[in-house]
Image (cartoon, grey):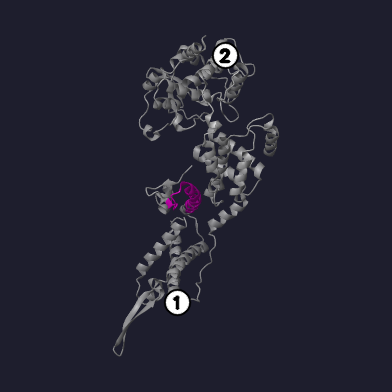
């Protein structure tokens, strides 16, 4: 999502690149000052200004297609807006002569006294009497047209006839303002200008009409369409949108299916309070409504959802409401404007019990996992899920690479390869790896991972060669309805750790290996930039790390220092006196 740009002066700006076909109307870059140094205020103003920029782009596109984006009444309205703005400044300052022109000067002699008189006339009179050059006057009028269009967030018309009509309307209003200045200069304050009252332009009226009809899920549909257009229609995007939709439906359950303009700061505050009462877990909670969940949590004393969960749900709501501001159907995003999102983020980042919870496996837990039936009994098979050899290799790969579960579950046989004499895994790192049914979390997650010697010794390369080429590395891992190959494995792996291994830990069953990998890398002194490259983390100093690449031979040398499971088991046995 686009963000406010902080200029060298500290003032935030909106900056948008203009497509080539619209540059004749808008220039190479559409830029507007947000007139604030406060980053939170800038976000609110940014969304409002973005909506105006969308109007400008739409008008420019309509003009490039040969359509009259501004009707005659719109033209007169723009000229009237300029007139009233200048009238207010003129009458506040009283500087009426600045809008008038000298016609003639003469000296009146009365006795020994001499008085000099200068006759000031309006612009219309000055043009008729040749006191004002038409070319100079036209230049001033065109400058006012350009400035008004810019302030209104509108492009300069590409059509010469439309531009001429605008200039003509502003010329007439300029002449009327000069005549008003003449009357005020002569002391006449009763006359009132004959210009249009302030009314919305056609594009503004359409935006206002759509605002009255929009509900939250309607807005979400356009948000989802834009997100797929901008980020791609990938599994990750679809998963994000599914989560957002579930959050919005829960919001509607708790707060009502309100028109989006009725979702106020107070509504969002109430929603946050409701979220804090929801249970984190409990028997039979999936079948209950949100209000029933709150009642059950209260009656049974169930643990409530965590602060990070509340923060994430508010972020989902905020993302959709910000989209509404950008479209112009909302004046503000109440999650941001009311400071509720910021407060929830602060609560989630506080040093509470959740932030102190251990996320990596202990060496004793690792010993329990890797001496369990999967790894010690040749004929072991899962009672409910036949994932083939994925049961054996997936946990080992997660331990030895720190890769995400889905990155490994989606591997193809061709992703096990040799580079520079080093056996590796390719995590969508090859040029032809833009598979429609596979994905990575970020572009930085595309990488080569050298295999740990223990994986080679255990026969991983032989396993890869035994699988039919051209297919999946783990053929029995089937994609979930959302398209994720590791989803079902993750559920059954969690059940295996709980029911078979008997593991009682706060560590995430699969993602805990990723945390463990980082911990053990630091323990043996593998440099952070190296294990960041292996895991696909940006890390600190990520701008500097965008230059050059981490050599594969360097990663292979360092990963060889990563402790093998045999070493860990020996160390645990020594500690326990086994």
Which residue is located at x 40 percent, y 75 percent?
122
Q: Nearer the viewer, residue 215 or 574?
A: 574
Q: Is residue 247 above or below residue 455?
A: below
Residue at label 2?
Answer: 372
Above or below: residue 97 compared with residue 362 = below
Q: Please state if 183 lies on the left or on the right of 226 as rendered.
A: left
> Comparing marks 1 and 2, which lies closer to the viewer?
2
Q: Quadrant of residue 432?
A: top left
The span from disc 1 to disc 2 (Cα, nearest Å) is 97 Å
Q: Which residues are magenta?
A: 31-59
Q: Nearer the viewer, residue 529 or 471?
A: 529
> Residue 543: in sight, yes or no?
yes
Main SS, magenta region, reads: helix
Element at label 1: helix
Question: Eyeballing the image, is 9 above or below 410?
Answer: below
Mark 2 neighbour class, 10 Å CA radius: few under 14, some 14 to 19, many 20 or more: some
């Amino acid at each position: 999502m686009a963000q406010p740009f902080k200029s060298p002066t500290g003032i935030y700006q909106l900056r948008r690149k203009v497509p080539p076909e619209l540059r004749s109307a808008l220039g190479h870059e559409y830029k507007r000052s947000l007139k604030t140094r406060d980053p939170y205020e800038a976000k609110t103003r940014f969304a409002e200004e973005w909506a105006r920029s969308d109007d400008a782009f739409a008008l420019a596109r309509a003009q490039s297609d040969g359509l009259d984006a501004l009707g005659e009444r719109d033209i007169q309205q723009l000229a009237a807006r300029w007139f009233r703005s200048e009238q207010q400044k003129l009458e506040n300052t009283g500087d009426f002569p600045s809008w008038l022109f000298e016609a003639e000067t003469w000296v009146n002699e009365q006795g020994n006294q001499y008085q000099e008189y200068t006759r000031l006339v309006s612009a219309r009179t000055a043009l008729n009497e040749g006191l004002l050059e038409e070319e100079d006057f036209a230049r001033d009028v065109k400058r006012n047209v350009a400035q008004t269009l810019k302030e209104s967030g509108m492009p300069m018309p590409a059509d010469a006839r439309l531009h001429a009509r605008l200039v003509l309307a502003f010329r007439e209003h300029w002449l009327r303002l000069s005549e008003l200045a003449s009357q005020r200069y002569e002391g006449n304050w009763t006359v009132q200008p004959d210009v249009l009252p302030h009314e919305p332009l056609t594009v503004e009226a359409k935006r206002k009409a759509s605002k009255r009809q929009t509900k939250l899920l309607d807005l979400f549909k356009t948000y989802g369409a834009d997100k797929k257009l901008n980020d791609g229609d990938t599994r990750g995007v679809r998963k994000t949108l599914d989560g957002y939709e579930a959050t919005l439906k829960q919001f509607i359950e708790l707060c009502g299916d309100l028109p989006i303009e009725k979702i106020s700061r107070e509504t969002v505050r109430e929603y946050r309070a409701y979220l804090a009462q929801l249970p984190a877990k409990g028997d039979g909670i999936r079948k209950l409504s949100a209000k029933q969940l709150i009642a059950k949590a209260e009656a049974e004393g169930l643990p409530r959802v965590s602060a990070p969960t509340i923060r994430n749900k508010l972020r989902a709501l905020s993302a959709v409401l910000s989209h509404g501001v950008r479209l112009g159907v909302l004046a503000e995003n109440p999650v941001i404007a009311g400071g509720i999102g910021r407060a929830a983020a602060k609560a989630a980042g506080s040093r509470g019990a959740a932030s102190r919870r251990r996320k990596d496996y202990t060496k004793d837990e690792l010993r329990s996992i890797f001496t369990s039936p999967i790894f010690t009994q040749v004929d072991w098979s899962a009672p409910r899920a036949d994932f083939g050899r994925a049961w054996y290799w997936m946990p080992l790969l997660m331990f030895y690479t720190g890769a995400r579960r889905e990155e490994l579950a989606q591997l193809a046989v061709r992703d096990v390869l040799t580079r520079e004499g080093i056996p590796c895994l390719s995590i969508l790192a090859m040029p032809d790896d833009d598979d429609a049914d596979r994905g990575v979390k970020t572009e930085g997650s595309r990488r080569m991972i050298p295999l740990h010697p223990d994986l080679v010794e255990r026969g991983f390369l032989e396993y890869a060669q035994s699988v039919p080429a051209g297919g999946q590395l783990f053929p029995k891992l089937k994609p979930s309805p959302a398209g994720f190959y590791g989803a079902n494995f993750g559920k059954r792996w969690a059940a295996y750790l709980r029911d078979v291994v008997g593991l009682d830990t706060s560590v995430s069953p699969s993602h805990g290996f990723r945390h463990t990998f980082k911990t053990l890398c630091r323990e043996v002194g593998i440099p952070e930039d190296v294990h960041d490259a292996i895991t696909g983390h940006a890390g600190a100093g990520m701008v500097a790390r965008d230059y050059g690449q981490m050599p594969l031979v360097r990663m292979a040398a360092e990963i060889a220092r990563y402790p093998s499971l045999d070493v860990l088991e020996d160390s645990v046995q020594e500690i326990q006196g086994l």
